[in-house]
Image (cartoon, helix red, strand yellow):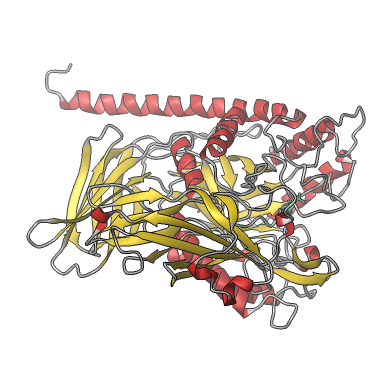
Amino acid sequence: MLRPQDGPTRESTRLDGVWRFRADPDGTGRDAAWSRGVPDAGRMPVPSSYGDVLPGSGLRQHVGDVWYEREVWVPSGWRGRRVLLRFDAAAHEATVWVNGVEVARHVGGYLPFEADVTDAAPAGEPARVVVRVGNELTLATIPPGVVETTASGRRQRYFHDFLHYSGLHRSVWLSAVPPVRFDTLDVATELAPTGEPPPVERATGEGGPVARAARRDATVRVRAGVAGDASGAVVTAVLLDADEREVARDAGDAGAAIELAVPDAHPWAPGDGYRYLLRLELRDAAGDLLDAYATRVGIRTVRVDGARLLVNDVPVRLRGFGRHEDHPVRGKGHDDVLAVHDHELLGWFGANSFRTSHYPYAEEVLDLADEDGLLVISESPAVGQNAVFSGGRLGAETFGEGPDLIGADAQAAHARVLRELLARDALHPSVIAWSIANEPASSTDAAERYFAPLVDLVRELDPSRPVTFANETSNRPGRCRVTPMVDLLLVNRYLGWYVDTGDLVSAEEHLRAELAAWAELGKPIVVSEFGADAVAGVHHLDPEPWSEEYQRDLVAMSTRVFDTVPAVIGEHVWNLADFATAPGLIRVDGNRKGVLTRQRQPKAAAWALRERWRAAAERERAAATGRDEDHRRNHQKGSDRDRPDTP
Ligand code: GCB
């Protein structure tokens, strides 16, 4: 499945806007054939979560089905082409009908799916699109949950700490594509060995120098899969630089690998979102154009070397956040305004990285990260697989076979979601690692059995990126059975908050000891969560939890410790901004661990982080400029020597 785009052979239109909508907690619509048309429907904007849009509707706690409906004219000019209907996300499972005909079913709330609706929606006629979206989580879904019957009706319980927003969170597309067409695309990039001495040692403190990679010869391997009868067809791949100058071209049979040699390539690197444009053409034996597709390509490599994480063979140090797709009213509905604003804020902080905690984000977000040269840890939606957070709903073992355990069905769903995630995100240079889960119970045999095949699967699907997962605090070094399997350690730690509450001196000692123990494993460590709740406007002279000062001081204490542990190559504060959660005794209108409020205004910690990270970014820029300058001088010397008239 390829992303919709416009081009010589393709056209696409977004079906975003206000759709007809009706909640259906009793599941009436399934028997009453609402698939043909939803009676007495109200309205709901797409994309958005439906939870907070209609005041007083109770939809925030809704469990079960909702129905969406709209009409669309299929352009008459699309005759003879295939018509695809794509949902960038339907949270959390959906069935789609077009003119009463079922065209798609999909389970999982954060990844796209599409249907070929050519027959159900003839060109030149109106088509009625009806979507049933369900949001029930079970122990077989990713993420897990349990529906309970209470005095107030059915309640969805889940073991993750963000509101279970639901609905059509991302764009819906109608596209025309040629009958014989590209339908998958794999791109792998490689840089020639550098020959240069390894970059300057990472200094401790405030980030350390991380230099941009110099230009190097590169190889771009392209494999485009084709749907339809492509016998005799030829694929041409052309690579253009950012100034649209052709730098490489080659051709091959449909489905075969094409290798493009790119001399003196400009790598994609942290803070430098340089990308080439890859143009693909599919022509039949007579030379007629069957399809064309274009995508941006960042040339870069990622590698773990001992306790270092290397991008383009240069050690990187991640500074940034765990985030959420979460905004007032929209919930998890993607919005370009808010997404761009959040990314500008990352720049304001001097951040260079984030994790898509705890689910795949809208692809538009990854586009922004690609463009900005941000380093992204892309996470699957497997969050809350841990009895510790389940309030007794999961058996103590968490994983295994049985009515209160997460077993083979979940594992199969987890594998499916990982396949879909990698298929969607592998083309993004910003994605530098795959996190297969957040904070599972990871210290048992059953956890090892559950995760081993998933780690293998990700490695097999994408040998070019490290595999990781975020470790929860009770799964200590030596006990955790999943850490030994992964390439990069993510540890979520709340010293000074859930542990040593209000005592930053003890917290510092404990954090230092724990990180030293993790460092023994000889792998790079990203502290992927640390932080404290702070209610904006609460101030205190003493180290009082919930105050802005305490949050600021806890972050400062933590980063002070990180700077003394060479294996710690990343710090992700939890969280960029406050976010909505299920109601709870330790949640004040949501989780307040944002260093920004939910409205994206700074708390005291934000200013302190900005100072630390901008200084690090500045040092990186200086180091990168120095390296570029060296490279330019060496290169210049070489070419001067080649010129006979140069003394
Ligand atoms: C965690 C979870 C994150 C929570 C956070 C918290 O460990 O990974 O989802 O929101 O702690 O604030 O408790």
* Depth check, front residue: 25 or 198: 25
What is the residue that sits farthest to the right in this orientation? 542
* Depth check, front residue: 362 or 552: 362
Residue 276, given in percent of the width and then of the height, sits at 32, 41
Q: Is residue 101 left or right of residue 160?
A: left
Numbered-mark total: 0
If the image is split into quadrants, where does the C terminus sit? top left
What is the residue that sits farthest to the bottom in this orientation? 402
Residue 490, given in percent of the width and then of the height, sits at 64, 53
If the image is split into quadrants, where does the N terminus sit? bottom left
Examine the rendered structure and indicate whether residue 300 appears above or below residue 158.
Answer: above
Q: Quadrant of residue 121?
A: bottom left
Examine the rendered structure and indicate whether residue 71 appears above or below residue 193.
Answer: below
Q: Quadrant of residue 80?
A: bottom left
Residue 637, given in percent of the width and then of the height, sits at 26, 24
Residue 5, given in percent of the width and then of the height, sits at 34, 49
Examine the rendered structure and indicate whether residue 333 appears above or below residue 180.
Answer: above
Q: Is residue 193 left or right of residue 330?
A: left
